Image (cartoon, rainbow, N blue to C red):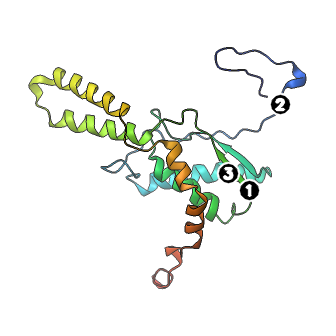
Amino acid sequence: MVFRGPHDRYEKLPPDQWRSLPVVSVPPARWPKLTHNGTKYSFASERDLVKDKLRGALHICAYANYTNVVIGDFGLGNGYRNPPQELAELWREVILYDPDLRGRIRQVAFVFEDPTQSTTQLILDDLAKKSKSSSSSGGSSSKSKSKSKSSSSSGSSHSSAPTDYQIFRQVFDEAEIHRVLTQPDSKYSLSNLLAE
């Protein structure tokens, strides 16, 4: 049951105003190992695990005959740091191509609590911080840490990396969906079908 108000004041609603809301909760991968530039999962097994979690959540929805789904910022933000571009593409792949789900989920709304959040920038800042601390000499470690911290925080305020919202909007843009659906799937190319 959902009966909470705005974040600054929670007030119980009268029972006649309560609404039932089905929820599927799946824990995302937390701080997965990423490639050196932070844009992809380092291991195919970790990518497959994330994809299976997405697929599992949507299978539960489809099994219960829910065709309209609202998805929060699953695996994004400072607490999880999954690569947003690849995560958006995984959602698209599962929604469009999973044979058991295709056509069963009619509408998907991705909801972002903070539309200015950029997990990409958080990942890049962390990579820059690790790079600076590994290249600094051991003699002035406290100075280099404070410099790294200040440059990292100033870098995120002047972020050039796209926000999570912008990435998902681009990946699920109507023209992009059309492009993805009309391009041949390389898994079904003649060379792949004939390979043993």
The tag on residue 19 is: 2
Is the N terminus in the top left, top right, bottom left or bottom right quadrant?
top right
Asked where in the image residue 97 lies, by quadrant, the reply is bottom right
Q: Which residue is mark 1?
A: 106
Residue displayed at 65% across by 39% down: 25
Q: Residue at x 76, y 39 (%)?
A: 22
Instruction: Classify residue 47 as left or right of residue 36.
Output: right
Between residue 33 and residue 93, name the one nearer to us. 93
Spot occupied by residue 52 in the image (x, y as percentages of width and height): 57, 53
- In the rendered view, does 3 fall on the left or right side of 33? right
Q: Which mark is residue 58?
A: 3
Q: List x then y, in percent, for residue 160.
A: 37, 42
**Category of crowding for the residue at label 3, using alpha-carbon neighbours closer than 10 angstroms: few (below 14), some (14–19), many (at least 20):** many
Q: CA distance from mark 1 to mark 2?
A: 22 Å
How many circles with numbers are drawn on the protein?
3
Marks 3/1: CA–CA distance: 11 Å
Discs 3/1, front: 1
Spot occupied by residue 175 in the image (x, y as percentages of width and height)? 58, 63
The residue depicted at 54 percent of the width and 36 percent of the height is: 115
Q: Identify whether 35 is placed above or below 126.
A: below
Between marks 2 and 3 in the image, the one whose residue lies nearer the viewer: 2
Q: Secondary structure at mark 1?
A: loop
Q: Is residue 109 above or below residue 176?
A: above
Say which residue appears at 49% left-offset and 85% top-offset.
190
Mark 3 or mark 1, earlier in chain: 3
Instruction: Label 2, secondary structure: give it.
Output: loop
Q: Which amino acid type is shown beneath numbered disc 1?
A: Arg
Say which label, 2 or 3, has the lower sequence index. Answer: 2
Instruction: Using the image, determine if residue 176 lies above or below residue 34.
Output: below
